[in-house]
Each structure stands twice: as structure tokens, then as C-alpha cells.
Amino acid sequence: MKGKALLINGMVDHVHLLFDLPPSICISEALRILKANSSGWVHEKWPSRHNFAWQIGYAAFSVSQSNSRQVYSYIANQERHHRKVSFKEELLAFLKKHNIQYDERFIWE
């Protein structure tokens, strides 16, 4: 996709990615391709993990260049961070703080 992964770090129930994406690719298309390709890779590399699947939805946020260092640090320190607050608590607090409308029925599918 001519993008560049800057950092990827995951927990048991979610993964964070920081990447540069060319303006010709929209986030939804990038994530569709990433999820499809990575699912195929998991199933090919580990056939016993035939139940592996991404959830249908995702949360994606653009980040300004001036905030990318802070986001990088946040992603790099996921394990320590989630000892204090769960991913679910954190995402809901973020959405509320930034006045982003959501329907909780569609977040945790």
C-alpha cells in the first residue's frame, strides 16, 4: 500500500498500530487489506489456529506529526499502561473526552 509501519504493539484483546499511510489510501481500505492479509498469514503459518479472526470493527484515529512521538510512546508502553486501565475503559473514556459519538453495541462485537 506504499505505507510504512512505525510501530505495532498488541495485547491479548487488541493491537495498536502507528503507520504512515499515503493520501491515496483511506484508513478503512488499509485496515481491510491489513486484516485480510494478516488473517491469511496466521492461518497459513499456524493451521491449528483456524479459529483466529479479527473482530468486524475497529477504531482508527489520525495523528498529527507533532503528536506522533507521544503516540509512539503510548503504543510502546501498552503492557504497563493496561495494568492501570483496561482497553475497554480507555477507549470509552477517549471517545467521551473527544465527544465522539458511538453506539457501544457495535464496539465490542
Image (cartoon, grey):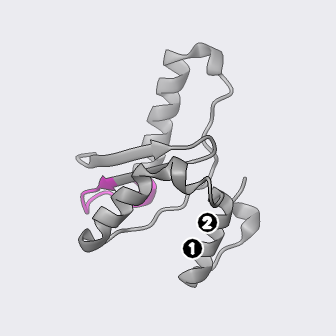
Left or right of 18: which side holds 106?
A: right
Reply yes or no: does residue 44 show up in magenta. Answer: no
Reply yes or no: does residue 27 show up in magenta. Answer: yes
Q: Which residue is mark 1?
A: 94
Please tell me which residue is depicted at 23% across the width and 46% down the height of the picture: 2
| Mark 2 → mark 1, Cα distance in angstroms | 6 Å
The residue type indicated by label 1 comes to Phe
Please tell me which residue is depicted at 64% across the width and 46% down the height of the picture: 55
Q: Residues within 10 Å of mark 1 (few under 14, many from 20)?
A: few
Identify the mark at residue 90; answer none if there is no mark: 2
Q: Position of residue 52 (x, y in %)?
A: 63, 30
In magenta, the rendered stretch is 19-29
In this view, the residue in front, 66 or 60, is 66
The residue type indicated by label 2 comes to Glu
- Work out whether 29 lies above or below 53: below
Tell me the SS state at disc 1.
helix
Quarter location, residue 11: top right
Q: Position of residue 95 (x, y in %)?
A: 59, 75
Quarter location, residue 93: bottom right
- Work out whether 78 lies above or below 94: above
Please tell me which residue is depicted at 53% across the width and 47% down the height of the picture: 79
| Res. 26 in view | no
